[in-house]
Amino acid sequence: MSSPQSGLSRSYLSEGFSIRSWLGTKDHKRIAVLYALSITLFFFLGGVAAALIRLELATPAGDLVSADTYNKLFTAHGVIMVWLFLIPSIPSVLGNFLMPLMIGARDLAFPRLNLASWYLYMAGGAIVLWALLAGGVDTGWTFYTPFSTMFSNSHVVLALSGVLVVGFSSILTGLNFIVTVHTMRAPGMDWFRLPLFVWANYATSLILVLATPVLAMTLILVAIERLFQVGIFDPALGGDPLLFQHLFWFYSHPAVYIMVLPAMGVASEIIPCFARRPVFGYRFMAYAILAIAVIGFLVWGHHMFVSGQSVYAGMVFSLLSFMVAVPSAIKVFNWTATLYKGRITFDAPMLYALGFVGLFTVGGLTGLFLAALALDVHLSDTYFVVAHFHYIMVGGSVMAYLGGIHFWWPKMTGRMYSEAWGRLAAVIIFAGFNLTFFPQYLLGYAGMPRRYHSYPEEFQMLHVLSSAGAVTLAVGYLLPLGYLAWSLRYGRAAPPNPWRATGLEWQAASPPPVHNFAQPPVVVRGPYGYEPMSEP
C-alpha cells in the first residue's frame, strides 16, 4: 500500500490539551483514547472484586465475607468485566483508533455519533457503579429469572438500566463501523484487500446491531415483571420460565464472538508481522470470520441442556455447537501455517498473540466437552464452565487486547515502551492465567459447583493454587500499566513503522495527524505483503 506523506497536519495529540477539547472531540483517535482510559478503570474495578473472590475461596469455610456479600462480589465482577470491559474493549479502543486508518479514511462515517457512544458508555457505567455502591446486586451477571424478578432484594432494575444504556453505546459503535467500511474505503481497497482486523470488527458490528436489541428488550421485560408483576417469565402469573433464557442467550452467545472476533483480528495482524510471512489462506480467514458470526446466532440453546428444553432441540443445538468450532479451527490452523517456516521474532506483541492462540485453543477444545449432551449434564454449573469461559473470554480476549495495545502503542502515542518489561509481563500473565484457571477444570470435573463461597476441604489445594495464580495474574496486569505510562514521558520517539508492518495505518506518522492522511491513499495490493527478513 502507498500513502502520501506531504502536507500532514499536527498530531492528534498536539491539537489542544484542554479538558473541553477532549470531551467535545469528534476525532476517532481521541475518542479511542477516552475509551481506553474508561475501560482501564472498569477493568481494575472488576479485578478488585475478583481478588476478593479468590481471597474468600483460599479457605473452605466462608470466613471472609458472608454468602450474600459473596453473591454481590461475583455479580459485580461479572457485570463490570462482561458489559463494561470485554464487550467494548477491542472494538471501542483499537477499532475506533485503527479502522479509519486501515481503510484510508479521514474518520468514521459519523463522528458525532461516535462521541455520543462514549457518553452513553460512561452513563451506563456510572449507573452500574451506582447500583453496586448503593448495596449491590446478587443475581449474577446473567440476571436469571425468577431470582431477578421475584426473590432478589438488591438493586436489579438499576443495574439493568446501566447495562441497557451501555448496549445502546455498542449499537452506535457497530452502526458506525458498518457504514464506514461500506462507504469510506480508499480507492483500490476492495473487500479482499481489507485487513483481517477490519473484517473481524465488521462482523462484530453486524452482531452488535442485530443481537443487542434483543438483549435490550429482554432487560426491559425483566424490569417490567419485577416492577409491575406482569406475567412474562413467572409461571404463577402465566409466564414462561424458559423464555428469559432463550432471549438472553440469543444475545449472549453471539456476545461471546463480540469479544472473540476482534481478538482474532488482532492476532491476524500481529502473527504475520512477526513471522514475516503473509497470512496463510487469507480468503478462508475472512470467510471463517463471517461464518463464526452467522453460526454464532444458532447455538444459544447449548446453555440450556439441563434447563428442561426438548431433548430434540438439545441434539440440534449440540450439532450446531460442534459446527461453530470448524471456522474457529480454520483460523487456528491458518495462524499455525502462517508461523510455519517464518522468521519469528518474539517481541512483546508476538508473545501476547501466541498466548492468545494457546489459551483460545484450550478454551475452544474444552467447549466441545460442554457441547456434548451427556457430558454437559455432569459439567453444567461447575467450575469447569468457569474455567472454559475464562480461557476464551479473559485468556483469549484480554491477551489479544494487550497484544494489540503493545503492537499499536508506538502508532497511538508516538513512543516506544521497554521491550524487556513487555516480554516479562506477557510471560507472567500467561503463567498466572494458567495457574489460576487450569485447576478450575479439575475442580469442575470433580464436581465443585460454581458460585459457592464455602466448599468441602478436599477441594482446598486446587483453590489455593487458583488463588496463587490470581496474585501472579494481578502482578502481570499491573506491569503494563506501569511501563506503558512511563513510556509516555520517557520512552524514545517511535518511528512511523517500528515493526516493518505492511498495513496502511503504518504509512501515517506516529502519532497520526488529525485527519490521518493529507491525501486519500491509493491501495494497490493486499495488506500482508511480507517478505522473509534478510539475514543480519
Image (cartoon, rainbow, N blue to C red):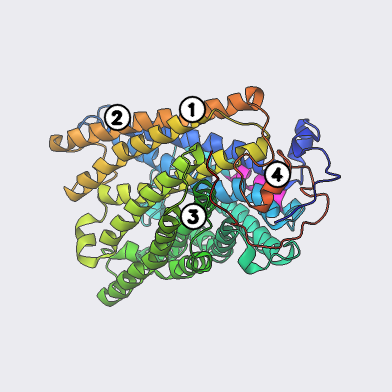
Residue 155 in view, yes or no: no
| Disc 3: which residue | 264
15, above or below 197, in the image: above
Residue 388 position, x and y percent, is: 32, 51
Residue 92 in view, yes or no: yes
The magenta segment: 114-124
Q: Amino acid at mark 1?
A: Trp
| Disc 4: which residue | 29
For label 4, the crowd category at 10 Å Cα-Cα, with few meaning under 14, some 14 to 19 and many 20 or more, is many
Q: Number of callouts in the render?
A: 4
Q: Amino acid at mark 4?
A: Lys
| Disc 2: which residue | 468
The secondary structure making up most of the magenta span is helix
Q: Nearer the viewer, mark 4 or mark 1?
A: 1
Farthest left residue in view: 458
State left or right for residue 107 relative to residue 336. Answer: right
How much space separates mark 3 and mark 2, taking CA atoms? 29 Å
Residue 221 position, x and y percent, is: 49, 61
Q: Nearer the viewer, mark 3 or mark 2?
A: 3
Callout 3: SS: helix
Q: Nearer the viewer, mark 4 or mark 3?
A: 3
Whichever of callouts 3 and 2 sits on the residue coming sooner in the sequence is: 3
Callout 4: SS: helix
